[in-house]
Image: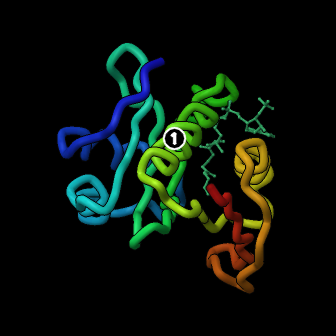
Amino acid sequence: MIIKKADIGYLEEIAKIEKEVFAHPWSAKSIKILLEDEKSVAFIALVENKVIGYCGLNTVLDEGYITNVAVLEKYRRQGTGQTLVKALCTYAEESSLAFLTLEVRKSNFPAISLYEKNGFEKVGERKDYYSAPKENALLMTRYF
Ligand SMILES: CC(C)(COP(=O)(O)OP(=O)(O)OC[C@H]1O[C@@H](n2cnc3c(N)ncnc32)[C@H](O)[C@@H]1OP(=O)(O)O)[C@@H](O)C(=O)NCCC(=O)NCCS
């Protein structure tokens, strides 16, 4: 598996991952902004030239906001999610970001566990942040 910074050429493959993984996938337009905005970055995980996972990050000054981390179901539990989150943390360190933060469904144990493993801590909770199904979001942050 190879991790690579994504460019606009990966728009369609990332959109495909979004559709396969999330009930409310990001639109191609939102992904395009992620890939083209100089204040954002995305990494892809490739196996035999196929995108099997991706993650994204927006920055505001020295703050980093993780947008999404997703791995195709078939390829999970093989270390890809871990490698993607590590790529975001390395990027944050190299870019002198003060912290990385994100929201995650309170019941999303795999993702919460992944973030905790990478030094993120629960710092708050947003009530009914998600819809269909309605659920609280946990706010998780790692300071650098
Ligand atoms: C969360 C997700 C990205 C993990 O990807 P993955 O490639 O399976 O993760 P890894 O194999 O690298 O696992 C790394 C760590 O994540 C945690 N983890 C991953 N899957 C888990 C599961 N099913 N149950 C419990 N912990 C899990 C563990 O801490 C694991 O470390 P370990 O292997 O030492 O136990 C993947 O399950 C996914 O795409 N989920 C759907 C999308 C999503 O919910 N994204 C997060 C939105 S905020």
Q: Amino acid at mark 1?
A: Thr
The x and y percentages for residue 115 are: 71, 49
The x and y percentages for residue 39 are: 30, 62
Position of 90 with respect to 58 (left or right) is right
- Report which quarter residue 40 is drawn in: bottom left
Name the residue tied to disc 1: 90
Q: Is residue 5 above or below residue 121?
A: above
Position of 44 with respect to 70 (left or right) is left
Ligand 1's quadrant: top right
Task: Give the camera-side residue of 89 and 7.
Answer: 89
Tell me how many marks there are. Answer: 1
- Report which quarter residue 51 is drawn in: top left
Scheme of image coloration: rainbow
Position of 139 with respect to 8 (left or right) is right
**Secondary structure of the residue carrying numbered label 1:** helix
Name the residue: 25% across, 39% down: 10
Position of 103 with respect to 112 (left or right) is left
Task: Give the camera-side residue of 39 and 108.
Answer: 39
Name the residue: 63% across, 74% down: 132
Query: Can residue 19 be seen here?
Result: no
Q: Is residue 26 above or below residue 111?
A: below
Query: Can residue 42 be seen here?
Result: yes
The residue furthest front is 96
Whether ligand 1 has any atom under 8 Å from the Cβ at mark 1 is answered as: no
The residue furthest top is 48
- Crowd rating for badge 1 (residues with CA inside 10 Å; few <14, some 14–19, many 20+): few
- Report which quarter residue 73 is drawn in: top right
Of the 4 image quadrants, the one containing the C terminus is bottom right
Name the residue: 43% across, 18% down: 47
The x and y percentages for residue 133 are: 68, 73
